[in-house]
Amino acid sequence: MPKMKSHSGTKKRVWKTGSGKYAFKRRGRNHLLQQKSRRQKRLNRTVVAHATNIRPLQTLVPNL
């Protein structure tokens, strides 16, 4: 049986918190911030993945 491979794009974007939940940052906070609205910048914070998305995340990154 071949090894389980992790999805390399997901590995770079998702991490596990101390309580075991999956967290990620939303897009849009790296550059060109001067012309983006305050609301747009505020919405880019660390977010905990919703319960319905945990199963797909576990298959994408099984050994995270």
Image (spheres, helix red, strand yellow):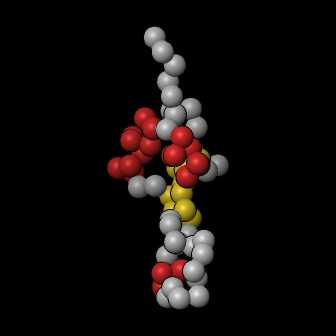
Viewer-closest of 15 and 29: 29
- Which picture quadrant has residue 34? bottom right
View extreme (right): residue: 18
For the question of whether residue 63 can be seen, the reply is: yes
The answer to whether residue 60 is above or below residue 47 is: above
Residue 11: x, y in percent? 56, 44
Viewer-closest of 51 and 28: 28
Q: Residue at x 41, y 55 (%)?
A: 50
Residue 24: x, y in percent? 54, 57
Residue 43: x, y in percent? 49, 76
Q: Quadrant of the C terminus?
A: top right
Q: Residue at x 51, y 28 (%)?
A: 5
The answer to whether residue 36 is above or below residue 23 is: below
Q: How many marks?
A: 0
- Which picture quadrant has residue 8? top right
Q: Residue at x 46, y 11 (%)?
A: 1
